[in-house]
Image (cartoon, helix red, strand yellow):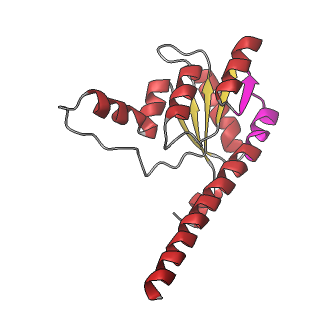
Amino acid sequence: MGLAAEAQFHVLAVDDSLIDRMLIERLLKTSSFHVTAVDSGSKALKFLGLVEEEQRNEEPSFVAPKTHNQDVDVNLIITDYCMPEMTGYDLLRKIKESKSLKDIPVVIMSSENVPSRINRCLEEGAEEFFLKPVQQSDVNKLRPHLLKSKVKEVREEDQVINLSRNDIKEILA
C-alpha cells in the first residue's frame, strides 16, 4: 500500500437515506477521509466480504465465492440505525461476530434519541452513537477511534515482524 493510501483513513458509510448518505459523505470528505457509501447493511456486508462467507457456509454445493475482500481496508464503519431489511444494530452485531472485522470501529447514527437503543448499541461494541443530523463536530470525534485502531494494527504487524526475526535467528543459529 502506498504512502498516500496509508495517510488517508477509509470510512464505510451506510445509510438508506440518500440525503443523509450524501451529508455524511460530504462531512467525512471535508475531514480528508476516503469514503465508500452504500445504501444498506447487506451491501456493506458484501463490500466487506462477509456475505460471501455466509453463503459459503450455508450452500456447500454452490461454487465457492471469494473470501473476505482483502483489497478493502476499511478503518471505520458509520451506519444509520433505522434501515429496512437490516438495522444498523444488526450490521454492528455481524461485524463484531466476524473474526476478521471485529476490530473495525463502528459508529451508529439515528434521528431518534432512544436511550435504550443507544445503550444497547454501545454495549454491543459501537464506539459512538451520533444523533442526526450529524455535525462536523461529531465527525471530529472519529479520529481518536481511527488512530486507536491504527495503533493496534501497527502493533500486530510489529509482532509478526518480531516473530519472523526470531524464526530467522533460530534458523541461522
Q: Which one is nearer the viewer's eye here, 156 or 39?
A: 156
Residue at image position (82%, 35%) is 137
In the rendered image, residue 44, in percent from the top left (x then y), is placed at 48, 32
Q: Which one is nearer the viewer's eye here, 108 or 121?
A: 121
Report the side of 64 relative to 123 (left or right): left
Residue at the bottom extreme?
173
Residue at the left extreme?
61
In the rendered image, residue 114, in percent from the top left (x then y), is placed at 74, 11
Residue at image position (71%, 51%) is 147
Q: Is residue 49 above or below residue 17?
A: below
Place residue 2 in its image quadrant: bottom right
| Magenta range | 127-143
Q: Is residue 155 magenta?
A: no
Q: Which one is nearer the viewer's eye here, 161 or 142?
A: 161
Q: Which one is nearer the viewer's eye here, 29 or 169?
A: 169
Q: How many marks?
A: 0
Place residue 46 in its image quadrant: top left
Q: Is residue 134 magenta?
A: yes
Residue 66 showing in the rendered view = yes
Residue at image position (46%, 14%) is 85
In the rendered image, residue 73, in percent from the top left (x then y), is placed at 52, 49
Report the side of 146 relative to 17 (left or right): right
Residue 114 showing in the rendered view = no
Place residue 120 in its image quadrant: top right
In the rendered image, residue 132, in percent from the top left (x then y), is placed at 73, 20
